[in-house]
Amino acid sequence: MSVAYSKWVDSAEQAISDLKAGSSVMCGGFGLSGNPETLIRALAASGVGELTLISNNIGNQGRGLAVLLQNGQIRRAHCSFVGGNPDLEAAMMDGTVDVELNPQGTLAERIRAGGAGLGGFYTPTGAGTLIAQGKETREIDGRLHVLETPLTADFAFVRARQGDEFGNLRFYRSSRNFHPMMAMAGRVTIAEVEEIVPLGSLDPDDIHLPGVFVQRVIQGGPYDNPIEYRTTR
């Protein structure tokens, strides 16, 4: 790609070449839906460790981000769900990974707040529970609220169905999940795109994430696209 403002990078390995030990990484996906498989494979192969991962599940059923747990590359995890992830469950129990569990809506809003540059927000979710321990609380309209702080990351990995070399992206149905807000909250956002389209071919009304939030674009694939639970009847 020869356009001066192209963000095209030739490979996932090149795209993550400056991701160092101790980096924080946001990774889109809900369970195994919409996982940026190409970037996850490259990160696993790199062997870079002591990572802080921010993702809904940190993998599932031994797949997706779970390979990083199996490799011992993760030091800390921010997530909202452990069920279906025996690797994360084991790491929590033996203390090899420091896990911070968030209510799912709180996790999403913390990421959104990070991308929007907000200092935090008050939510009634978790008030009066272990979630609130050590956090500032205040009463609003007669109801106790907990102050939650924003989340940002050194890198954000996102996957889109279509995108151009500037990073304008379209996602596919429910696989959009956490990707747009994570792209806004990452200092360096790397988009792996299933189908690269010419610049200007995406109607502005059809763009789910403007390229201003993306720093690097790679061709994604091949994809496994595993189905977690297949229902036949």
Image (cartoon, grey):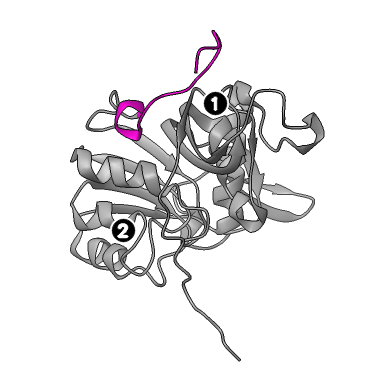
Type of the residue with mark 1: Val
Q: Where is residue 157 in the image (x, y as percent from the top left)?
A: 45, 38
Residue beneath the point at 43% across and 59% down: 57
Whether the magenta-drawn stretch holds residue 4 is answered as: yes
Q: Is residue 102 left or right of residue 210?
A: left
- Residue 13: image location, x then y, percent: 29, 32
Residue identifier under label 1: 214
Specify the segment rendered in magenta.
1-15
Residue 209: name its quadrant: top right
- Of residues 35 and 143, the one nearer the viewer is 35
Q: Is the magenta stretch mostly helix, strand or loop?
A: loop
| Residue highlighted by disc 2 | 66
State how far apart marks 1 and 2 are (Cα): 25 Å
In this image, 54 relative to 195: left or right?
Answer: left
Disc marking residue 71: none
> Tag 1, which secondary structure?
loop
- Identify whether 69 is placed above or below 196: below
Question: Under tag 2, what secondary structure?
Answer: helix
Crowdedness of circle 1 by 10 Å Cα count: few (<14), some, many (20+)? many
